[in-house]
Image (cartoon, grey):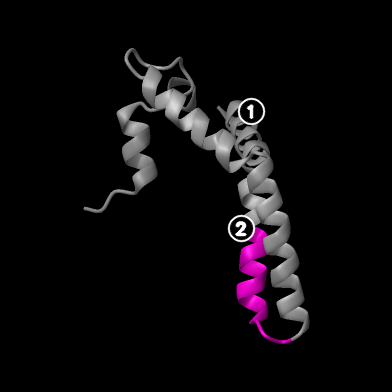
Amino acid sequence: MKYSPLAIIAAAGASPAAAQGTDPQGSGPIVAALSWLQGTLLGNVATAVAVIAVAMVGFMMLTGRLNWRFGATVIVGCFVLFGSAAIVSGIRSTAAISG
């Protein structure tokens, strides 16, 4: 008999509200490291590098030196990287409405 992953999660009693609790005890260094990583990935240097990358990829696509599919992948990746906070908050609000 084959079970779907959603059925297994539902049977285990996992809910989105349980995953949004406070940080567990002893996770301070991990949370601090992830906050540093987030600050680095979304800081001024990363923004400048992303702007330069999108400009160079766009120029290479316009001159025919780069495949359009790869160029679009780079540009969409930058949008996902810098829009990740908005994406996660949208998912959380949707989960809160349906749950």
Q: Is residue 38 left or right of residue 43?
A: left
Where is residue 29, by image quadrant?
top left
Which residue is painted at 67% across and 85% down in the image?
65
Which residue is painted at 76% across and 85% down in the image?
63
Q: Label 2: few (<14), some or many (≥20) within 10 Å? A: few
The x, y position of residue 48, in whole percent, is: 70, 50
Q: Nearer the viewer, residue 99 or 50?
A: 50
Which residue is painted at 35% across and 36% down in the image?
9
Q: Label 1: few (<14), some or many (≥20) within 10 Å? A: few
**Residue topped by disc 2:** 77
Q: Earlier in the sequence, mark 1 or mark 2?
A: 2
Q: Secondary structure at mark 2?
A: helix
Q: Is residue 59 left or right of residue 16?
A: right
Q: Nearer the viewer, mark 1 or mark 2?
A: 2
Magenta highlight on residue 98: no
The x, y position of residue 75, in whole percent, is: 68, 62
Kindly identify which numbered label has been placed on residue 97: 1
* Range drawn in magenta: 64-77
